[in-house]
Image: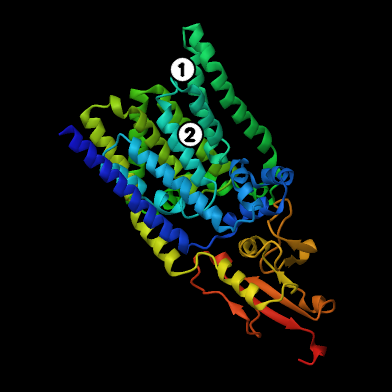
Amino acid sequence: MLKTKINKSLILNILYIALYCVITLFVVLHHEIWADEAQAWLVVRDLDIFGVIKHVRTEGHPLLWYMVLLPFAKLKFSVFSMQILNWIFMILAAGIFVFKSPFHKITNLCIIFSSAFLYWYPVVARSYGLMILLFVLSMVLYEKQKEKPYWYAICVALLAHTHVISFGFCAALAGVFFFKNILFEKDKSLKKKYICPFLIMLFSLTAVVLYLNGSQNENFIVKGYDIKNNAVLLKGLYFDIVKNLYGFENWFFALFLGLFFVFNTIYLFIKNKSLFFIFAFNFAYILSVFIFIWGMMQQRTFLLLFVPVFCLFVLYGTQDRRNKIISNALIACAFLFTLPNAFEIIKNDIEHPFSDSKNIARYIQKNLDKNAVIVTNSPISTASILSYLPEDGQKIFYIPYNGYFTYYDWKKPVLSPYYPIPVEEILKQVPEVYVLTAVYLSYNNIKPLYESDLKTVMHSEIFRIYKFERKNNGK
């Protein structure tokens, strides 16, 4: 009987992961990357390792994702390799979670088929996929930290370098490790055993702080972030969290999410002070990031759900039957309610371009000379196009910087996308020029050579190309 149950469980887990692989790969194959995805690839493709280290701090990110991408970019792989690499990270994360999770099978199913696991992390290729993989590994290793302190410490240390949003969680894990295994450990020989693993975590966290310290003053967007709208209207901030998680701002989701957080706050405080500290510290840290540093987006906001899952994962074996039922129900619903939003965004990404970057890059390669003068009014948006063009292919010029660019330098402020391009001045120097505009700027009296589908999901990456020639060319 036991063998039958084990076999049934194994088969179900394999089916879950197989289905997850098929669905997410299908969406990845239909997803066109946008500027935020392209930026990391262009940075590692076009800079040497020292240039990458110098530049990335202005992005406000640690270096790990860039270092992972670097060899693939330098070996001349296409940008699609970044998407596949990110997808592989999420397949590993989903597989480890499903096979190690103590939760009910239905709860596991709700988590891996939530909008987070189904779309935001595996499809949008940024550092978050690597973050979730290391997060899941740290969850599995948490209860084994005494037997495998170095593996646990390395996992936490690497997680801290995936994204600044995970820093608070890692700091809390390091703090709990110190108090449990060093400060309150009476056996001196055991204390010595855990000092080096703790130092690994401490060194990693310190390195992140030293690397990113002051970087907010080097990024013109972050430097200009206005905290008043978030800090004063906390109600609005809460509903922004609800919208990022569930795609809708309504009272049902708001009330349920509040119930979820209240349950975790009370239950963890009663059952396990260490896990309560991890949960509360992470919650306060993430809200502080949203209010004081930079706004929220889906991949960052979901950590507010995943950390409670981490805590209940660790506690699950000590729970009685009633609390297990409550935990499973709340977690399952918290992720199941994201499914309608997942269906909508996946449907839109499959039916329409997410960004029109890939299509317009194909058009440029096919129809424009390699040495054609292409000028843009929106360097941030057009970075996605450049990731699909070969390194030695067509270049794009931005007049305010008086030069060509690929990745975007955040130290340089960008002008309004309505910035008029001085075509007549350019034509005094070259016989013809191609103007590449984002959706914000158009020339109503001229028919574009190329125009993006207006149903493109990322509205800032709807493009047009216009061709201008000297009037004295006789054309």
Question: Eyeballing the image, is 427 above or below 85?
Answer: below
The reply to whether residue 433 is in sight is yes
SS at circle 1:
helix
Q: Earlier in the sequence, mark 2 or mark 1?
A: 1
Residue 220, percent across and down? 69, 51
Residue at left offset 46%, top offset 41%: 133
- State which quarter of the image contains the N terminus: top left
**How far across and how far down the image is residue 188, in percent?**
51, 7
> In the image, what residue type sits under mark 2?
Asn
**Which residue bears the numbered disc 1?**
180
Q: Which disc is residue 282 wearing?
A: 2
Identify the residue shown where x is 54% and y is 66%: 459
Asked whether 61 or 143 is in front, the reply is 143
Image quarter hosting the C terminus: bottom right
CB of mark 2 within 8 Å of CB of mark 1?
Answer: no
Q: Is residue 298 visible?
A: no
Q: As shown in the figure, which amino acid type bears the numbered disc 1?
A: Lys
Q: Position of residue 52 (x, y in %)?
A: 70, 46
Q: Is residue 122 left or right of residue 316?
A: right
Residue 64 image position (x, y, % from top left): 60, 41
